[in-house]
């Protein structure tokens, strides 16, 4: 998140992705702590991890594209 601030990247997409990361992380943690771990529960937990991963990668791409010098 510091990189977003330093690069001056912001907007509704950044807000949505940041909230998605937070919500997916909280949900993943709750599933991990509250439910008995079965293959199905692990798959659901992984889906929330995947949401975090995709959101973070999208944010990284946004920072790099904004900071990359244009020709």
Image (tube, rainbow, N blue to C red):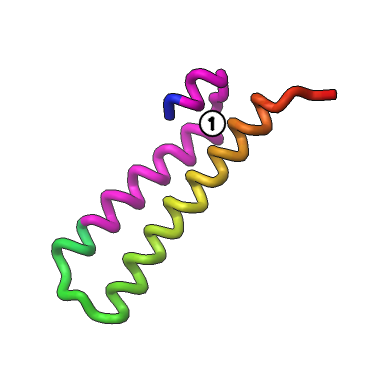
Q: Is residue 24 above or below residue 2?
A: below
Disc 1 element? helix
Pointer 1: what residue?
12
Residue at horizontal 37 percent and vertical 66 percent from the top: 46
Q: Taken as a whole, is the magenta stretch helix, strand or loop?
A: helix
Which percent across, then down, holds residue 9? 56, 24
**Which of the 4 image quadrants contains residue 69?**
top right
Task: Give whichever of 16, 2 is nearer the camera.
Answer: 2
Q: How crowded is mark 1: few (under 14 residues within 10 Å), some or many (20 or more)?
A: few
Residue at horizontal 43 percent and vertical 25 percent from the top: 2
Q: Give the range drawn in magenta.
A: 3-29
Question: Quadrant of the image for the N terminus?
Answer: top left
Q: Is residue 16 above or below residue 24?
A: above
Which residue ends up furthest to the bottom in the rendered image?
A: 39
Residue at horizontal 51 percent and vertical 18 percent from the top: 6
Q: Is residue 47 above or below residue 58?
A: below
């Amino acid at each position: 998140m510091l990189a977003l601030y330093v690069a001056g990247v912001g907007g509704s997409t950044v807000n949505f992705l940041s909230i998605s990361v937070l919500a997916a992380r909280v949900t993943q943690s709750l599933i991990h702590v509250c439910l008995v771990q079965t293959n199905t529960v692990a798959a659901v937990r992984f889906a929330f991890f995947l949401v975090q991963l995709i959101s973070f990668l999208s944010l990284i791409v946004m920072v790099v594209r904004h900071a990359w010098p244009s020709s």
